[in-house]
């Protein structure tokens, strides 16, 4: 188990600086332009966010803009449906890492989860994991399970496979599924299923209260496009 995948003690009264370091500042809109991505990166530098999360199209732009800043670059793979073939997801992963991604957020195949096709799901995620772990230093892998679209049993199955693969994080949502995004209940269920991965809560998190509730429930990362507002809200409260 890597240091990144160990579960730290819960912290329910984080300062704005501590929370900022846990935020993946996210922009995944299809209409995002280079100007928008550069603004995202500047906000990440200014606020001290842990990472930015962008589409593969913009990884090299973000990596160049954030070089030497300490802010990591995460790229989504198989986004947003998760229905890409294994070969396509592997190719996307390789290209994103080549362009400067430090972390990969891969959308798990929902059909495989719903059908209980553990063999397909395991083989596909292992193929992506192998690419991430072949790099020096190893690239962090987050598995997006789209929890709001699944039953409790399906969520547990997806988490067990992510655990078996050795994923560093299980991530709740893409933020684009009509079923919804992250919930405190889902974060708790994902945490209860295993302690061997960390949790990234994402999808619909727009306030400091929501972000802190997710962390209290067991999340170590928050994926949000509202990071600036969340940090400013905490600062205004004297934190």
Image: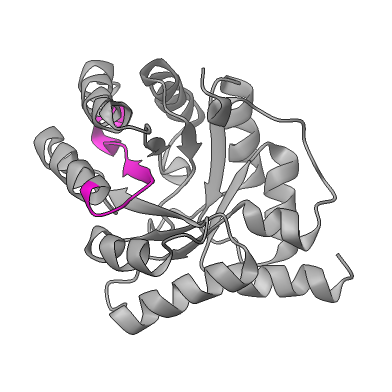
Q: Nearer the viewer, residue 193 or 115?
A: 193
Q: Position of residue 39 (x, y in %)?
A: 45, 80
Can the viewer see residue 33? no
Residue sitting at 80 percent across and 72 percent down? 235
Residue sitting at 35 percent across and 43 percent down? 104
Q: Most extreme residue toward the right, as rendered? A: 238
**In the image, is residue 55 above or below residue 123?**
below
Q: Position of residue 11 (x, y in %)?
A: 80, 41
Q: Position of residue 108 (x, y in %)?
A: 31, 37
Question: What is the magenta range?
Answer: 98-114
Q: Nearer the viewer, residue 31 or 100?
A: 100
Instruction: State yes or no: residue 102 in magenta.
Output: yes
**Toward which corner of the image does residue 193 lie, by quadrant?**
top right
Quarter in which the C terminus is drawn: bottom right
Q: Position of residue 19 (x, y in %)?
A: 70, 55
Can the viewer see residue 106? yes
* Colour pattern: one colour
Residue sitting at 61 percent across and 21 percent down? 195
Q: Most extreme residue toward the bottom, as rendered? A: 35
Lateral position of residue 19 relative to residue 81, left or right: right
**In the image, is residue 199 above or below residue 21?**
above
Lateral position of residue 148 relative to residue 99, left or right: right
**In the image, is residue 176 above or below residue 154?**
below
């Amino acid at each position: 188990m890597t240091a990144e995948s160990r579960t730290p003690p819960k912290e329910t009264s984080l300062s704005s600086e501590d929370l900022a370091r846990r935020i993946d500042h996210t922009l995944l809109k299809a209409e995002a332009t280079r100007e928008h991505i550069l603004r995202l990166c500047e906000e990440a530098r200014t606020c001290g966010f842990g990472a930015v999360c962008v589409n593969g199209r913009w990884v090299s732009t973000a990596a160049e803009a954030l070089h030497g800043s300490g802010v990591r670059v995460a790229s989504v793979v198989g986004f947003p449906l998760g229905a890409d073939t294994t070969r396509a997801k592997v190719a996307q992963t390789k290209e994103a890492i080549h362009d400067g991604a430090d972390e990969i957020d891969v959308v798990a195949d929902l059909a495989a989860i719903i059908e209980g096709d553990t063999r397909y799901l395991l083989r596909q995620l292992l193929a992506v994991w192998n690419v991430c772990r072949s790099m020096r230093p190893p690239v962090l892998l987050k598995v997006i399970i789209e929890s709001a679209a699944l039953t409790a049993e399906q969520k547990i199955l997806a988490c067990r496979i992510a655990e078996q693969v050795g994923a560093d994080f299980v991530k709740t949502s893409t933020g684009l599924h009509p079923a919804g995004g992250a919930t405190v209940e889902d974060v708790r269920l994902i945490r209860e299923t295993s302690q061997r991965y960390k949790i990234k809560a994402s999808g619909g998190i727009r306030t400091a209260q929501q972000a802190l509730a997710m962390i209290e429930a067991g999340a170590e990362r928050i994926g949000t496009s509202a990071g600036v507002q969340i940090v400013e809200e905490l600062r205004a409260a004297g934190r």
